[in-house]
Amino acid sequence: MRFEVPLPAELVEELSAFWTAVFGEPDPDLPPSVFLGQEHEYNRNIVYLDRRGEKLAGTCGLTVSRRVPILGGLGEVATSPEFRRAGIVTELCRQAIDEFRESGGQVVFLGTGNPDAARVYYRLGWRKLAGASVMANISSGDSPEAFLVGYFRGLGTAIVRAATPEDRIPMIPLLVSPHDWQVLDANAAMFSTSYSVQESCMGLYRRYEAVGRDSQGSWFSAVTPSGRIVGLSTTRLDASGGCRVDAFTHKDFEGIWGELVQAAIEWGARLGVSSFAAAVSVVDEEKRALFESIGFLSAGSGEPFELDDRQVESVRLELERM
């Protein structure tokens, strides 16, 4: 069975209860409001499900970017314990990927830390990305690494704007690509896959969205005319009344880094904030130099970063605006 969002409220309630039983929460990646249609103008969301009699036996969900329809993300892959090992989600995932390809889709991302599930996905065409528990199903048969190189090639200029749900899927290629900087964004606890295993995929948007919770922060995207996300920045009020800011870009778009940081600073300035701070890994000397080039000054050591099972020292940088 196939249902395209917006879904009836009673079905959303049933799915939420099912996912809570399987995952321990209604859905680890998408809130119920998404299935009711809250992001309908930004993304297509399709739920595939299998019933055995009156019982919901299995589900999977496909999210496709409306702005960049070659990109998709798979989630909500769940089977009721009593129906496991019956091949239910295998068939549902196959249906989702076949439909995606038929509509011109080029890559579907998913995240899994389950080796048994990973073997099933591999048989369906997904391949693991280096440095991540993320897999990509490339319609052309290219490796994920080759696809990502081509995806960011020849994109032209980019503009900075406030982030929206439109970024939910297009931000994935940027965040699962390896970067030279160790710490990409301290506010979102986002690290390069060159240094730390990225465990999330469809949950990446939620991590950035959390920066803005309770109206205490915001985040911004650098977007090309084709809708591809090539940079992100964040800003979050801190306990001292200042703002913590951070930003990173794809290596081919480093020139827009300053605009991303400025957007983060201006958000705080509109609230009357005059003190801004950034935390930079001691390894990321280039990033530190960029902050210093726009007026940030060293303020000693900061709190260490937790990268997997190790700690990395940080430098605190501060900027005062009168």
Image (tube, rainbow, N blue to C red):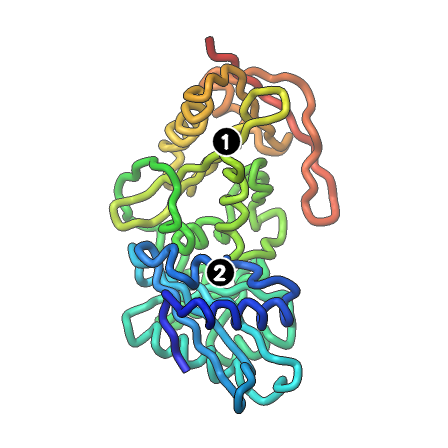
Three-letter code for the amino acid on which mark 2 is drawn: Pro
Residue drawn at x 40%, y 28% is 263
Can residue 24 be seen by looking at this rendering?
yes
Q: Nearer the viewer, residue 215 or 105?
A: 215
Q: Is residue 303 above or below residue 91?
A: above
**Among the 4 quarters of the image, the one containing residue 41:** bottom left
Q: Is residue 292 above or below residue 228?
A: above
Residue drawn at x 50%, y 31% is 235
Q: Which residue is mark 2?
A: 32
Q: Quadrant of the N terminus?
A: bottom left
Between disc 1 and disc 2, whose residue precedes?
A: 2
Q: Secondary structure at mark 2?
A: helix
Question: Dot 2: within a 10 Å radius of its alpha carbon, few (fewer than 14), some, or many (20 or more) residues?
Answer: some
Left or right of residue 99: residue 300: right
Q: What is the x, y in percent for residue 133? A: 59, 61
Q: Is residue 186 above or below residue 139?
A: above
Three-letter code for the amino acid on which mark 1 is drawn: Thr
Q: Which residue is mark 1?
A: 235
Residue drawn at x 66%, y 81% is 81
Q: What is the x, y in percent for residue 6? A: 37, 65
Question: Dot 1: within a 10 Å radius of its alpha carbon, few (fewer than 14), some, or many (20 or more) residues?
Answer: many
Q: Which mark is residue 154?
A: none
Q: Nearer the viewer, residue 157 or 267?
A: 267
Can residue 286 be seen by looking at this rendering?
no
**Among the 4 quarters of the image, the one containing residue 100:** bottom left
Q: Residue furthest front?
A: 10
